[in-house]
Image (cartoon, coloured by chain):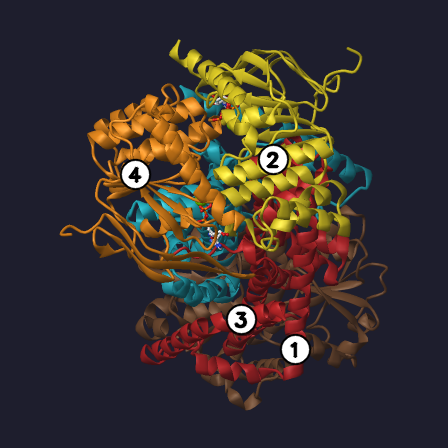
Chain colours: A red, B cyan, C brown, D orange, E yellow
Amino acid sequence: MSTRNAIRHAATAPAVLPVATFIGLLILWELACRLFAIPSYVLPSPSRIMGGFGAVDAARWFAHVWSTFRVAMMGFLLSIVISLPIAIALARSEVFSRAVYPILVVIQSTPVVAIAPIIIVVMGAGDLPRVVITCLITFFPLVVSTTTGLLATPPELIELSRSLRAPVWREITQIRLPYAVPYIFSALKISVTLSVIGAVVAEFVAAEKGLGYFIQFSTSMFQIQQAWSGLVVLVLLSLSLFQAVNLIQRVFFPWSIARQSR
Amino acid sequence: MSTRNAIRHAATAPAVLPVATFIGLLILWELACRLFAIPSYVLPSPSRIMGGFGAVDAARWFAHVWSTFRVAMMGFLLSIVISLPIAIALARSEVFSRAVYPILVVIQSTPVVAIAPIIIVVMGAGDLPRVVITCLITFFPLVVSTTTGLLATPPELIELSRSLRAPVWREITQIRLPYAVPYIFSALKISVTLSVIGAVVAEFVAAEKGLGYFIQFSTSMFQIQQAWSGLVVLVLLSLSLFQAVNLIQRVFFPWSIARQSR
Amino acid sequence: ADAVTFQLDWLPGGDKAPIYVCIDQGFCEQAGLDVTINGGRGSSEAVTKLATGVSDIGIADIGALMAARATENVPVTAVMSVFNKGPHAFYSLDGNGIETAEDVAGKEIATSPFTSSNVFLPLVLGEVGLSEDDIALTKADPGALGPMLMTGAVDGIIAWMTDVSRYTGQAEEVGKEIVVIPWSDAGLELYSASMIASDSFLAEKPDVARRFVEAYKKSIEFSIENPAEAAQSVANMVPELNAENVEGSLRDTLVLIDNEVTERDGLGVLLPERLAATWARVAEAQGLDASALDPETMVDRSFLPGTM
Amino acid sequence: MQTPPAISFQDLGQCFETRSGRIEALRGVEFDVVRHEFVAVLGPSGCGKSTLLRLIAGLLEPTSGRVEVFGSSVKEPRDDVGIVFQKPTLLPWATIEDNVCFPARHKRGRVGANERTRARDLLDMVGLKGFEKRLPNELSGGMQQRVGIARALFMRPDILLMDEPFSALDALTREEMGLELLRIWEAEPKTVLFITHSISEAVLLADRVIVMSARPGRVIEDIKVPLPRPRGLETSNAQVMNDFSAHLRSLLVAPRAA
Amino acid sequence: MQTPPAISFQDLGQCFETRSGRIEALRGVEFDVVRHEFVAVLGPSGCGKSTLLRLIAGLLEPTSGRVEVFGSSVKEPRDDVGIVFQKPTLLPWATIEDNVCFPARHKRGRVGANERTRARDLLDMVGLKGFEKRLPNELSGGMQQRVGIARALFMRPDILLMDEPFSALDALTREEMGLELLRIWEAEPKTVLFITHSISEAVLLADRVIVMSARPGRVIEDIKVPLPRPRGLETSNAQVMNDFSAHLRSLLVAPRAA
Ligand SMILES: Nc1ncnc2c1ncn2[C@@H]1O[C@H](COP(=O)(O)OP(=O)(O)OP(=O)(O)O)[C@@H](O)[C@H]1O
Ligand SMILES: Nc1ncnc2c1ncn2[C@@H]1O[C@H](COP(=O)(O)OP(=O)(O)OP(=O)(O)O)[C@@H](O)[C@H]1O
Ligand SMILES: [Mg+2]
Ligand SMILES: [Mg+2]
């Protein structure tokens, strides 16, 4: 009951304002396009973009969205699964940290397109390379923020844990991780939007469907309105995932959200 | 004297281990390439990549590195300059936060390639569009982390500030921002590597020089070793920038680095 | 000298040699032109840059211009053909059992996701009595196609004729031999890369445009006669390229510029029938309404020297 | 009376709403503190003393009744009020001296040379000479508490609110600090509201002692201390003091026993 | 003696290196605590009492000398030691009850139903019935301190180290808690090291009182409390107690005056 209420409250209350902002911006955009007669191959007006939605049928749209969503989610979850242990190891061991951090930076800063051939040769052209590419793009913020968070725990609480002679992993799970929760969620918010970007980039590299593919394909066919309609859907997907992360934090970790103090 | 010492210490001590790791990895890589006879257009061995450096002369290399570095830095600094006020506004005002956050997510999750034509048409072909693209890719982690950090300040200290009736901006600069420093540096580390990625992506979209252009160009010309040598330089650039951020934190904000507790 | 911004449809390379020849060999200067080259990222992007006036004149696939004219009515016009054949081809390795276009049936073929070849694929398959269902198609980054072919991950790939020497080089490294099947041989007759220009440039500086087209044509002829020197010109201007590689791809490219069609129709000519056939193919391939565009409205042949 | 009291509570009530129900912290609190009076507040743990202080400081709004300072209702913090918080509340990245100067830096953006001298004098006064350049986490609990006291005195507030300022101090330091406080109070008269758990400290320092009941906190005794000023260490042994302390003690025991 | 002392310090010294120089906190500390003895430690603020306690707890390594617990040198924290920290040190996201049960959850990963009952009994004992489901920031300073005490008792440690556990409590609660502690100590004998600033509390509770000098902390008095057990509230008024207190007081004043 209380959890359900929390969900309902968290889900509805903040929706009004952003929706209003968006509608306002859409109107401005439409007006700008009309007033300045911006050619639609530069920036189509919202009303023309609406037309782009008709380009393919609902089932096809769904297939594109589902494909991008699936890859983004798998990459995102994979990067969470990978980042947590890495972050814990980085926080625990100075030596590991010095040896491994630079390697992570190298991985993070390698442009995916440059290594796409190897990834595809090694992993084929299925979902796997796309999930891996998404994960490569997503994991770094999670590792950095989680590590920082794990190290930010107040020393008194670490002394408490040490004085109890608890196994190290409990110090991590029961003290450091809860303390790192604000850091972790801050990284999750960054990473979840990056995961969509990652899926899109992966579709540029290897795919026959997905929103990134659709946008790029439409652009290469000079179907500008269609490309923009794909972009709109993509952005909505990203927003929903971002809000989902927010909602999870509000419902399950309400104490981790600092209240406004004024 | 003490600051200089701190710089020297921070700069030299941690260098040995990562260098050792790197040399180890290079040897493994070379061996793997030779043992499994990996064709050089899939993954060239380090020794062959070295050959790629001879493709263009030092002056040309410098021009590429400088171009990428300049764009990355300008984009990075611009995103810092932009993110801080946005983060402060987001932390201060619930209303602003609700109205603006979704817009930031939209900007963050729009693939640059999809809007590159507009950016170029609107901003011409100079450095500006590249700096803007870099900034678009870089700013989001900074905004999210800084906002989280600003809100994570212990309520007692905020009460102290309120009891002193200080102007709000001093509450922010003297209490909230110092508290947010670990969050901010965690974001700076993420963003500085993203800024290199951003510059590279911008060069993919519009440029005649820079390391990203060089890599893409070499790849499309099937000059794989040359592409990899560009990649190596790019990764070194990224690593240096990352270490520079680390160094700045160590020297100027030593208290913000949580010590290992065991 | 009059300033002209020239738009490439992709990065510099041997296939773009004429514009470098024009500058490096002084043809542009002789014509009183000061040419700046803008790199490009695909034909559609090049069309957009011309339409918005970022560049004056350039090279792009005429199919992209046709699609752009049909859907958005962009103010860009074609003035000259450069490739009078489609550059698309199947590549395979000796021993993979692909010798003609018919042989791709039942094979695994890789292509890059956004190449214009993909739209023509059903048509060329149709010419040999196949459909897309008869092949297993994978889409992957262009850089991965060669490695996929050489490592045996796929039986064949779809790539351009301009890259024959490069794929040959890759095959040699693993001791294999390449098989190339141009789609034009399988019946796909069309114009592809063409010189296109923004309407405002043509209207405001017709004289400059005419001089440019003439100088460019001269450069093409020079490249045909002196491929090695032409390649050197490219390498002079683009230090990242070496003359040897450039010459290889220039020679590959010349097949599309100087061939039996050129012999028959003349260099740079856009014949109405072949143009109409190209549009018919493009419309069919991209699912556009064939009546949405009269291809004659998008060409202006008056800038090509010797035609008027 | 012509001049309004320095602090005045009128039928003050305070409730906290929490996840797991409401807590009534204060109920019907009503008393005045005259200008330059030194008032001590005693009461059982959790009875609402800190809450009372936060209400005067303008850090909390009363859920019912009024809090007035110098005749005007408290809507927000005031410049003329200095606070010693129950927790030390120091800036972990600033040196001890910078922590003491913090009010100046925070209010006006800069710290003058005089102010630095004043901060060092105050630190000397609270027995922390030599610790000016240390960081808070290098100090013991009692030392941190003394830094908080120095900081509150730094701006020479008219009204000084002190929440168990001496609780982490040993008996001797405690007495020294108490007498130092009296000295300051006599030299620069100010209104002091002093929360403490020590009956003898309340009696030694205050003009008046307010005794509060257990939660919800109400005033159960409001009584003048019948000892002459100036007071000193010898006061603590006086017979009057002992009797008075016994009375307060009985008051503090009574409500619980009831 | 056959059995080793519960706690033994041998020529113990402790220095802290900081950014701005070294601090000598303890010098040549040497005393034993016998099994099941209740020892109080008195000393001026900053003299190294908390440091001493952290050394026994194995949270700090001595820079010179030895600390032994049950005859073996302390290298790391031990299971049979319970600590009440000077700051409450509660987990801000856990309820009061969960905070009390935390040692069980943290050591063994789960909390049994008996243990929940025990936690609630302990909370009742420290006067926090009804606050089981609240969060730490909804409690007053003294209430938080009492949670810390309940948590330390939770695991029934052999050795109980208490760092000014009652400092934030009012006199009455303080006495009640002190007597409760004595009751527990008599029912389940344990060794207690009790840091306090209250002389009367030390005398009321302890078998022995150790008095330390100002920094660097040394033992300046180690003295048995000449009062019979069991002790109760009436003890605090006894004449013996007053004399004894006066003696301790003089000790605490002396080193400073010197
Ligand atoms: N932020 C809060 N949320 C909920 N309840 C609170 C809050 N602050 C205080 N309370 C409650 O109000 C009551 C009074 O708290 P307060 O801190 O004023 O007590 P106190 O008299 O200062 O006690 P102590 O002597 O232990 O410091 C307590 O029961 C406490 O649980
Ligand atoms: N982590 C530390 N770094 C540097 N100095 C320290 C540290 N911890 C304690 N000290 C110093 O050691 C001395 C003793 O500190 P300690 O906390 O043991 O005092 P204490 O007797 O508990 O005092 P109090 O009664 O005020 O709590 C102090 O002078 C303090 O400055
Ligand atoms: Mg309080
Ligand atoms: Mg202490």
Q: Chain of mark 3?
A: A
Marks 4/1 same chain: no
Q: Which residue is mark 1?
A: A62
User: Along the line of sight, which residue is nearer the eye, A68 or A218?
Assistant: A68
Q: Which residue is mark 3?
A: A9
Q: Chain of mark 4?
A: D
Marks 2/3 same chain: no
Real-space Cα separation, disc 3 to disc 1, in angstroms: 29 Å
| Secondary-structure class at tag 3 | helix
Given this view, does label 1 or label 2 mark the residue nearer the observer?
Answer: 2
Query: Does residue C114 appear left or right of residue B143 in this picture?
Result: right
- Residue C267 visible from this viewpoint: no
Q: Is residue C209 above or below residue D184?
A: below
- Residue A146 visible from this viewpoint: yes
Real-space Cα separation, disc 4 to disc 3, in angstroms: 40 Å
Q: Which residue is mark 4?
A: D103
Given this view, does label 4 or label 1 mark the residue nearer the observer?
Answer: 4
Query: Does residue E179 appear left or right of residue B244 in this picture?
Result: right
Given this view, does label 2 or label 4 mark the residue nearer the observer?
Answer: 2
Given this view, does label 3 or label 1 mark the residue nearer the observer?
Answer: 3
What residue sits 33% from the left and 48% below the top? B162
Amino acid found under the numbered disc labelled 4: Pro
User: Along the line of sight, which residue is nearer the eye, A196 or D202?
Assistant: D202
Real-space Cα separation, disc 1 to disc 2, in angstroms: 72 Å
| Secondary-structure class at tag 2 | helix
